[in-house]
Amino acid sequence: MSDLENESEPAPPVDVLRDRVLRIDTPERVSVEFPLAGLGSRFGALLIDGTLILLAFIVVALVVVLVGQQYLGVVSPELAIALVVAAIAFLIWGYFFFYEAFSDGQTPGKRLFGVRAVLAGGQPLTIQAAALRNLIRIIDLQPGTSCLVGGFVMLIDSRGRRLGDLVGGTVVVRELPIEFPDVTEVAASGGAPRLDDAGFEALESFVDRADELRPEVLLKLGRRLSNSVAKIDPPREGETPAEHLIRFHAEERVRRATARLSTEAGAPAAMALLRSKRSRWEELREGLPRFRRGGLRRVGEDEVAELAARYREVSADLARSRTYGASARTLFALERLVGAVHNVFYQPRSDAGRRLWAFMSRGFPALFRRLAWPIGISGLLLVGSAGLGYGLVRGDAKMERLLIDSSIIARADEARANPDADYRDTWEGAWMGSDALSVRLIANNVQVALVCFAAGLLFGLGSAASIAFNGLHLGTALAVFANRGVLHNIGLFVLPHGIIELTAIVIAGGAGMWMGSGIWFPGRRTRTAATATRAREAVSLIAGVAGLLVIAGLIEGFISPSRLPDVVKLLVAAGAATWLVFYLGLTGRGAEEASEGSAGASDADRVGGAPGGASDGNPGGGRAVA
């Protein structure tokens, strides 16, 4: 009630739906607001998803056992165990990524709690953003799996974002239903309401508290309010201020109840717009699920044109509703509708297979060359730490027990005792077979690469430490065998696959350090913005790294430990090195590089990090090299 004196008005109520919102402007110059999800709903969704992952672990184990019993002799126990390990790794790293990337930002837990991950601009998640926010999850879960890091960052961030959201450029919003209010005609006897919402709430507060106020306070406050109301409806003869206000309040309640105006429609002009357009809005809302499920590629050109026209229409209706003074409920429903149609038109392209091939064949090598400096630093760090480890152990044999696993020393001793033995002959325990070995090595090494990249968020130092650790392990392992005069034993095992594997790990470390460099050297941007931009560039490299590690894992499982002649293994190593030089150094140059390389991140926009896994199948025990 604008005419009531301010000192008599209580504070206006807070609209909980707009307390914490993501506000965006669509290309049609219409502002849309998305309510942000709270910490409680996100944690609840995480509990549901964690429970589903645990159940999936159990189901996978049972299925493998049953299949192994049914096809005994076809699937070896070692391969069955390796498949279980790989499946668990896939669930750990891939569950959230694949659901969010290909189910419009919703896992089953998020769907149950009515929340959805979207880009900071309100658009649906891209594969790249989904990969980033979920690779960084390993940092958010720390320490251990307590989620203290992610929870703390969410509490202090104005949009409730965890580190994965900050780096991926995403937010989590509430998915509330689109419900338009019903409107009835204003009864002729009732007339239109004479107070706005704030004025009516102030008057209603006075009437409700009249019995609780002291007489002198009631008289003083009643006079002030009555004088203001008198401008609209003068008091009748003989009415006291309190009686005047009570009568006026009763009449106003009838008017507002008749017009259904208090919370349902808004001002009269907005009510008229709602009455005339409500059926059109409902029709558009009911047709949206078909477009969201199949995308625009699966509908006809005429339907797309009709949807575009309806989108422009409802965007204009939203702008008019704001101008006409529509109620919060009407505006909220219209904003949800405009946002939903907006996301249909601006959703990621669905041709992920073709774009993945384009990225792997041209975009990845071009992006590798564009980020050659951080990758080069990562390579120097690996070589330097390997040289340091080799020098320390070669210089003092006593350092072996301090720097290397006892299993590696045992293998070196076995090789010295039997000079004709190859690396497979020094294997501890039962030989698991090449197929099982490849599965476990691929899962382990991809996980190493993913952790190495994600650790770059720790100021880049995490990736650097991971690279240095792997280099130190490689150098000390080589030195242990060299101290016993059997360097060829491990060398012929590492060379065939090691060139590709180490290159992939170096690229992952360089990608992580490039992401972390945004914290140290943000340039003209904020540190958060610089880190997020470089992370979006760097994460595209992880798709290529996963591909390289699959190739390396196959070689490491089938060729490296085999009893092929030494010359064959050396030829494989030389071929791998030659292919890498050609692939990373020459592929995608010229006109193709100009178009694909400059948009390397966009080529990988639909490509996420591949799932890795936790395994001890690698002879080094959780390291990237044997």
Image: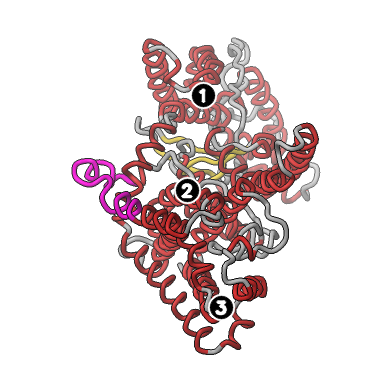
Question: Which residue in the structure is indicated by mark 2?
Answer: 551
Picture quadrant of residue 361: top left
Whether 369 is drawn above or below 38: the answer is below
Q: Is residue 394 magenta?
A: no
> In the image, what residue type sits under mark 1?
Arg
Question: Which residue in the structure is indicated by mark 1?
Answer: 292
| Image quadrant occupied by the C terminus | bottom right
Percent across and percent down for residue 572 are 42, 53
Image depth: mark 1 or mark 2 in front:
2
Question: Which residue in the structure is indicated by mark 3?
Answer: 480
The answer to whether residue 375 is seen in the rendering is yes
Q: Secondary structure at mark 1?
A: helix
Q: Real-space Cα distance between discs 1 and 2?
A: 37 Å
Q: Real-space Cα distance between discs 2 and 3?
A: 28 Å
Most foreground residue, 367 or 110: 367
Q: Tell me what residue is drawn at x 54 percent, y 31 percent.
A: 332
